[in-house]
Amino acid sequence: MAPIKIVQFPYLSDNYGILLHDEDSQQTIAIDAGDADAYNHILQSRGWILSQIWVTHHHWDHTDGIKELYQRWKCEVIGPKAHSQAPIAHLSHGLRAGDTLQFGNSLVQILHTPGHTLDMINYYFPEEKILFSGDTLFSLGCGRVFEGDMDMMYHSLCQFLTLPDDISIYCSHEYTRANGRFALTVDAENQDLISRMSEVEKLLDAGQPTIPTNLGIEKKTNPFLRTSDSSIRKKHGLENASASDVFAALRTAKDNF
Ligand code: ZN
Ligand code: FE
């Protein structure tokens, strides 16, 4: 029983695409599909046949390649059941919170994390300790709140706080440097954040991705997961605010950063 192969590759200006391959069944899954050429290039170079596309949310930079990939590979398209502002092309199977999928020998759990969009879902492999977090959780940041509200996004991020620390997080964008610069303005004394940022600068300067990240590190360094931290609260005069209100203040500050 071979482990799942994970290939991460950049596309557009700052997106990451993912292909998952199971040797035993020869099945290949694309997580999102914003750019058909980028996905086809990896599929061809590996000799893999695309079986399914698993969509996180309806935004164009995650979905624009679906039609072309579907036509070429006749693959199945799976994604959120609850549509928000745009339907997902060729969607044949809709997923909700708590649904499960099987990929090779792996169980996959569906988390629904609305806020950035209302339809956002994330794919969690508890045995492999991998989470595909879409545009909900980024390294040192989180997605902008477009369709939902601040309280909704706060509760979506709280779902990640209940997961074990030793999970690898694959998010959909390389935003870590800009996120980290903001994080340092609200959490300047955090030694874990300072050392993560120096590692991030080294990786990016060497042309390396900062993704995947690790959930345990994010819990210690990502301000949007640290709404109960007393020094962050103190700095913003929010000692007695609800965690959701602290989140809203941080997200608004980041929007204006
Ligand atoms: Zn998005
Ligand atoms: Fe995106």
Image (cartoon, grey):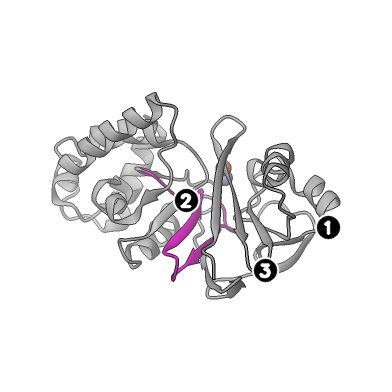
Q: Circles 3 and 2: CB distance less than 8 Å?
A: no
> Badge 1: few (under 14), some or many (20 or more) residues near its Cα, within 10 Å?
some
Quarter of the image with the C terminus is top left
| Residue 20 against residue 210 in the figure, above or below | below
Left or right: 102 in relation to 247: right
For the record, the magenta segment spans 117-139
Task: Answer left or right for 165 relative to 187.
Answer: right
Q: Of circles 1 and 3, which is in front?
A: 3
SS label for mark 2: strand
* Along the viewing direction, whichever of 182 and 36 lies nearer the viewer: 36
Q: Which residue is mark 2?
A: 170
- Residue 93, above or below 20: below
Residue 124: within the magenta? yes
**Rendered location of residue 214, percent (x, y):** 35, 52
Comes first in the chain, label 1 or label 2: 1
Going from N to C along the chain, the mark reached first, 1 or 3, is 3
Q: Which residue is mark 1?
A: 74
Secondary-structure class at tag 1: loop
Circle 3 residue: 25
* Real-space CA distance between mark 1 and mark 2, rounded to the nearest whole angstrom: 26 Å
Q: CA distance from mark 3 to mark 2?
A: 23 Å
Residue under the point 47% across and 36% down: 174
